[in-house]
Structure formats: structure tokens, C-alpha cells
Amino acid sequence: MASSMTVKSATRVAQGMLKRCEVTSRSLGNTQTIFAAYLPDVTEFKKLPVVYWLSGLTCTDENFSQKAGAFQAACDNQVVLVMPDTSPRGDGVPDEDPHTYDFGVGAGFYLNATTDKYKTHYNMYDFVVKELPALVEANLPVTDKRAISGHSMGGHGALTIGLKNPERYSSVSAFAPICNPMKVPWGQKAFSFYLGSDEQSWKQYDATELISQYKGKDLHILCDCGTADNFLVGEVNQLQPLAFMEAAQKAKVPVTFRMQAGYDHSYYFMSTFIREHLEHHARFLHAQS
């Protein structure tokens, strides 16, 4: 388990407090990592369920807090938001090229690395699934009811983590997720460095592969993608939503995947629909409370 938590800052927003917390993470090679937690005021009187948010390439814990406009919706739906960083950071953390945005620091891809260079530090899967919830549930006024959501690389993380751990999450959602990373440059680059050349080992972190074999409970999967997303309509379709939807249909796994006309890959898109996503999660989180 992680060491004790230190609150680095606390900022009032909507009807609650946004706290940035630092912890030494064993999953991330005993490095210091910061995560954010938004606590509606009602947590002074009762524990609330948690929506975990996973951000995309180049992000830290702060991007969602500053751009998504989610805090009033969190208060209205009585959920806590927890936002980890996207990778380990600090001295000694290997980074293939600090000038490259799609691999290394800021690009942990929510997996457990197995190659020698990266396996000590790049274990964001274990951090998000095990270490962070244990820490949050031991130190913050929350229940053990969880949902998970994310954007782009974080949407990939939310889908794969949910599909691999259905007993841990009431619901899953994603904005513009990387749905089939084995088949696109972002995923091929990351997986080859983190996991090595055996592509069979990549399948455990590919949402399209996972949903094609999924036999668990209904995770109430909700995805949104903008039709003007530059990573969908550019030279390379990095997102591959059709592959994911086709795999889900063949496996008879229910998924709501909405293509939103005119929206791009940015937080303008997410800020438009984040309330709907939090309402979606709250429906299932509170139904189990």
C-alpha cells in the first residue's frame, strides 16, 4: 500500500473543496505522485461514492480540474471526483524522449510495463486499480462504490480497467477513447516499449480485444466522440470507435456509443457533456448504496 497522504493545496469551488494530494507510490517505483480529489460539502456529513477520472496524453491531475467544468455537476449528483496523474514523474523515471508527447512521462497508458527499462516505474494500472482506491478509501470520506471515466488515452484506460475489473466498478464512460490501440500508431509505439514485441501480451490492454471476450456484468458503458475530432478524421484514425462497436455487437455486450456532431478532441467537447456522464455514473453508484 501507499504511504500516508499529504494535502498540498485546497481550493474552494462550487459547493466543495478541490484538494491536491501527494503520496509516495510503491506501484510507481516509490516516486512522489500527485492526485486531485474533489469533495462536495455533503461529505462533511456522509460518505459518497467516487468517480475516477483518467486524463489523456501530456496531461497531469490538473487538466480536468481546470477545464472540464465538472464540479457543480459532482455536487448536484453527490459524487466525489478523483483525478490521478497520467504517469510516474521525477528523478530516475525513464523517459524515451522528453520532447515526444505520446510516450514516457505524461503517457503511462494505464498499464503495467514488463520490459526491463520501464517495469519499475510504469505501473499505472496497479496504481489506478489497487493503490489509489485503497488510499482514497482509507483517507477520504468515500464509500467503496466506484465508477471510472476518462479521455483519449484515459478513455482507453477507463474501458480496459473496467472490462478487466467489472466487480470493482458500477459503470464506465469515456470521451474519444483510444479503442483499439494495438492497431494504431499511439498504441503500437507505447505497447512495444512498455510490453515488448509479443503482441499477444498487448491484447490485455486493448478495449476492442477485451470486449470481444467479455462475459461479465453490464458495466453500463457510455462513450462520446466528436465527429470533428482531429484524431478521428485526420490522416490516421487513432481512436477506432467502429472497431470497438463492432466487437461489442458481436459479443452482445451493451454499449452506448454516441457520435456528437461537430465536436473535436478538446475539453470544450468534454465540458459540454461531462454533466451527462456524471449523471450516468450517479444513477448506478447511488442505486447500489
Image: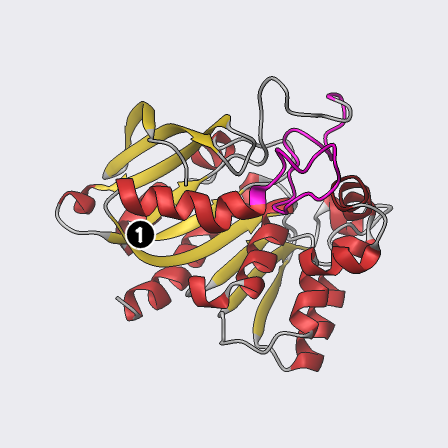
Q: Is residue 116 located in the magenta-colored stretch of the structure?
A: yes
Asked if residue 26 can be seen in this view, the reply is: yes
Q: At x 69% / y 59%, what residue is drawn? A: 204
156 and 143: which one is in front? Answer: 143
Could you say where residue 159 lies in the image, as x and y percent from the top left?
Answer: 59, 59
Q: Which residue is at the far top?
A: 91
Q: Is residue 216 above or below residue 9?
A: below
Work out which quarter of the rendered image holds the C terminus and state it. Answer: bottom left
Q: Amino acid at mark 1?
A: Val
Q: Which residue in the structure is indicated by mark 1?
A: 79
Q: Is residue 253 located in the magenta-colored stretch of the structure?
A: no
Horizontal placement of 152 versus 37: left or right?
right
Could you say where residue 103 lies in the image, as x and y percent from the top left?
Answer: 73, 34
Work out which quarter of the rendered image holds the N terminus and state it. Answer: top left
Magenta highlight: main SS: loop
Residue 87, quarter of the rendered image: top right
Q: Specify start and end residues of the magenta stretch as a single range.
A: 98-124
Q: At x 49% / y 70%, what residue is drawn? A: 220
Could you say where residue 109 lies in the image, as x and y percent from the top left?
Answer: 65, 44
